[in-house]
Each structure stands twice: as C-alpha cells, then as structure tokens.
Image (tube, rainbow, N blue to C red):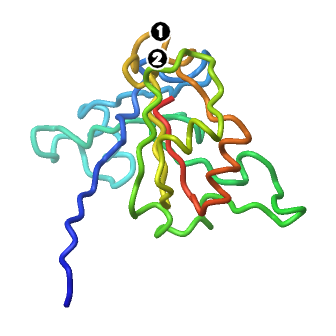
Amino acid sequence: EETLVSRRIIDLSVVLTDRVASDPPGLGPRLTYVGHDVGAQDFEKIFGMPVDKQLDQKGAAIEKAEITTHNGTHMDAPWHYHPTLNGGERAMTIDEVPLEWCMGPGVKLDFRDVPGGHVVTPGEVEAELAPGDIVLVNTRAGSRYGEDDYVALGCGMGREATLWLTDRSMRVCGTDA
C-alpha cells in the first residue's frame, strides 16, 4: 500500500540588500541602482537603438552588485573552510555540492533562548534532535536581522556538536546568524 507524504518547501532566503546590517563592517554588499533613463542610453550603446526609438525613451533598469560569497542567503562549500578534509582529500567547491543535498527532510534546532556567544555542545544538540539530512539552527540572531547588533548576536555550533551531527549523516546545516 502506497502512503501519500505531504511535502512543503519553505523559502528561508532573505533579500540581498545594502540597506540592512547583515555582515561585518566592510564585508557587506555594495549595490548600485541604474535607472531606466541610463538603461536607454546603454541600449543605444550596446544595440545601436537610439533612445528616441525606445518605448517612452526608457531602457532596462538594473542593479550592479559587488558581493562576497558570504553576502545574503548563501551556502558555504566545504572548500570555504579548508582546502582538504578526511585526512587530505580535496574539499568540494560549491559547484560540486550535489543539489539533492539541499532538498529533503529538515530538522530545526531551537536555540533562541541561549545567550549570545554560547557554544552549543553535542548534548544540547542530541536533546533537540532526531537526526536528519538537513539541520537548521535557529538562534536569537534571526530576530535582530537588520539591526546594528545582528552580526554579534546568537550562539554558535561548537566543533564537537558539529562532528556529532556529521557522524549521524547530516550533510547540510543552516543558521540564522
């Protein structure tokens, strides 16, 4: 007998913006907004279509972005942390992480009541978790997104807690901090 499973996809992403304090000073994104009038001038240069021949003399508006791989909603590849793993094996770059690792059952660890700077232990993880492929760590930092103290808030997963999760087949871990 086949059982129907209800699935729900939850979008956890945030908008990439330079108007919200979400990265350490100097590492945030820089966005330049280019309006329709400049877009029309660009279309004339690129495609040879005179501005007066474009609909309402308007071209495409765009945003130019200068970002790091840490800006906005993102996924860190194993390569981000170190060039090797497992005793010398080359770490995967982001384009080598299988997409199927990013979709599947998720388990939320709720550490919103833990004080900032606290390092989560394996025992705290075990008390919160039935192991799954994807672990989402909810700290209190998420409640301060966009505020000046966002970057400095929230707890962190300690080395032992992270190894405890990876020993139990966790492949992807997300956090709000």
Q: Quadrant of the N terminus?
A: bottom left
Secondary structure under the numbered disc 1 in the rendered image: loop
Amino acid at pointer 2: Ala
Going 20% across and 80% down the picture, which residue do you hit? 3
**Residue 72 left/right relative to 117:** left
Mark 1 residue crowding within 10 angstroms, few (<14) / some (14–19) / many (20+): some
Amino acid at pointer 1: Asp
Residue 61 screen position, x and y as percent: 28, 38
Q: Which mark is residue 37?
A: none
Residue 73 screen position, x and y as percent: 45, 40
Q: Quadrant of residue 171?
A: bottom right
Residue 155 screen position, x and y as percent: 57, 24
Q: Residue furthest top?
A: 148
Going 71% across and 47% down the picture, which residue do you hit? 80
Is 108 in front, or is 174?
108
Q: Which residue is mark 2?
A: 21
Is disc 2 in contact with disc 1, using a CB cutoff of under 8 Å? yes
**Residue 79 left/right relative to 156:** right
Going 89% across and 62% down the picture, which residue do you hit? 87
Going from N to C along the chain, the mark reached first, 2 or 1, is: 2
Going 54% across and 69% down the picture, which residue do you hit? 98
**Residue 173 left/right relative to 55:** right
Q: Residue furthest bottom?
A: 1
Seen in the picture, residue 166 relative to 5 is either above or below; the reply is above
How many numbered discs?
2
Q: Which residue is mark 1?
A: 148
**Residue 58 left/right relative to 89:** left
